[in-house]
Amino acid sequence: MKRDRDGQEILDFFNPEWGPNFLQWTEFVPATETIPIDPIEFLKKASERIEDGRAKHSGNLKVLAKYQWLATELNERVAALHLNYSLPAQPTERPQ
């Protein structure tokens, strides 16, 4: 848990401690896609998903705002880990 910018307690799901301690949901529900255990790979995969969501929902401001919030959270974690990438502040067009 961590305190968000608005003062609310939130689940800190971009925390790198989740990876090694995370029980894959695919152990309970059959699926072809797994969640990366390595924290950096997890953040990269999450950034792809966030970018896809921002592009897909660019016309829905309410949903887009949620993806913008996720991008901000992810960028804060990436900066704290001193990684050399981040999501752009605004959504980008993704080829279909």
Image (cartoon, grey):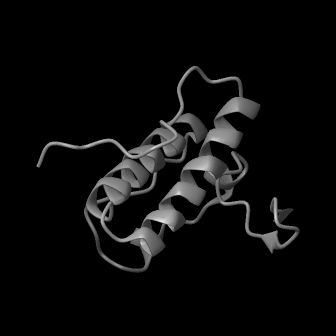
Q: Where is residue 95 in the image (x, y as percent from the top left)?
A: 14, 42
Q: Which residue is drawn at 62% across and 40% down?
A: 75
Which quarter of the figure has residue 92?
Answer: top left
Towards the viewer: 51 or 29: 51
**From the viewer's perspective, is 13 left or right of 84?**
right
**From the viewer's perspective, is 59 left or right of 25?**
left
Towards the viewer: 35 or 57: 57
**From the viewer's perspective, is 20 left or right of 29?**
right
Q: Where is residue 19 in the image (x, y as percent from the top left)?
A: 62, 50
Q: Is residue 84 above or below residue 28?
A: above
Q: Residue at x 70, y 23 (%)?
A: 82
**From the viewer's perspective, is 8 left or right of 39?**
right
Q: Is residue 88 above or below residue 29?
A: above
Q: Position of residue 38 (x, y in %)?
A: 55, 40
Which quarter of the figure has residue 21?
Answer: bottom right
Towards the viewer: 26 or 1: 1
Residue at the limit of the structure toward the bottom, as seen here: 28
Total tally of numbered discs in the picture: 0
Which quarter of the figure has residue 13?
Answer: bottom right
Q: Residue at x 65, y 51 (%)?
A: 73
Q: Position of residue 43 (x, y in %)?
A: 53, 42
Residue at the limit of the structure toward the top, as seen here: 84
Q: Quadrant of the N terminus?
A: bottom right
